Amino acid sequence: MLKQWALVWWLALFALPAAAGAQVGEPAPPVSLPLLSAPAGQELSLASLRGKIVYLDFWASWCGPCRLSFPQLEQMRRELGPRGFEILAVNVDEQERDALRFLEELPVTYPVVRDGTGDTPGNYGILGMPTGYLIDREGIVRLVHQGYRKSDGEALRTAIVELLGESPR
């Protein structure tokens, strides 16, 4: 009986959020969160970036692979930003100071917002850190990328460049 309950709990925890989350080919769920290093009340929304190719990156200070992704994402944004590419990083740390400490070590020029409640990761069906969503100019999810290895950077860059080359619909 206990094993059956554990299986049901595991399926509810892991399978259902993925099914309810952001899927390739569907509109990205809305995001509107406070900027991490801005005056209180200043928010940034995913909708405000419509018309750009956006990599929505969910991360946390305790995430080892996030330390690999940040420098590579920063380089991609510096290189491809003038062509219409933007990164929106969503921090999910419970404590804001943990995120700020991480950014002191690995500073970035792209916008970073914070969701300490976990609502936004829940809407996206996040199962691990980091998880990124490549979103086209019309707000449609075109790629979901879970985890991060150094070797992932080039494949991600290729996908971004391909989307940058597409004409708006």
Image (cartoon, helix red, strand yellow):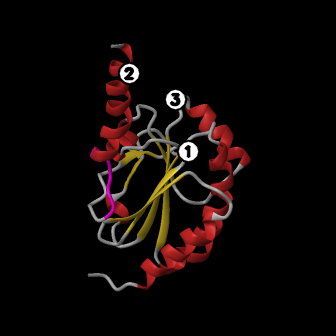
Q: Main secondary structure of the magenta part?
A: loop
Q: Mark 1: few, some, or many residues within 10 Å (few <14, many ≥20)? A: some
Q: Earlier in the sequence, mark 1 or mark 3?
A: 1
Q: Residue at x 62, y 49 (%)?
A: 66
**Front disc: 1 or 3:** 3
Identity, as a three-letter code, of the amino acid under mark 2: Ala
Query: Residue 101's x, y, as percent?
Result: 68, 38
Q: Position of residue 157 (x, y in %)?
A: 56, 73
Alpha-carbon span between mark 2 and mark 3: 27 Å
Query: Local crowd at mark 3 within 10 Å, few (<14), some, or many (≥20)?
Result: some
Q: Which mark is residue 94?
A: 3
Q: Which residue is mark 2?
A: 6
- Which quarter of the figure is the C terminus placed in? bottom left
Give the SS element for disc 1: loop
Let me know if residue 23 is in the magenta part: yes
Residue positioned 29% across, 65% down in the render? 25
Instruction: Say which quarter of the image contains residue 15.
Output: top left
Q: Mark 2 vs mark 3: which is more N-terminal?
A: 2
Mark 2 crowd level (few <14, some 14–19, many ≥20, 10 Å Cα):
few
Q: CA distance from mark 1 to mark 3?
A: 16 Å
- The quarter holding residue 51 reads bottom left
Q: Quadrant of residue 133?
A: bottom left
Magenta stretch, residue numbers:
20-24
Q: How many marks?
A: 3
Circle 2 — which element? helix
The outermost residue toward the right is: 105
The foreground one among 164 and 50 is 164
| Image vertical order of residue 50 relative to residue 145, above or below | below
Question: Image height check: is 100 above or below 79?
Answer: above
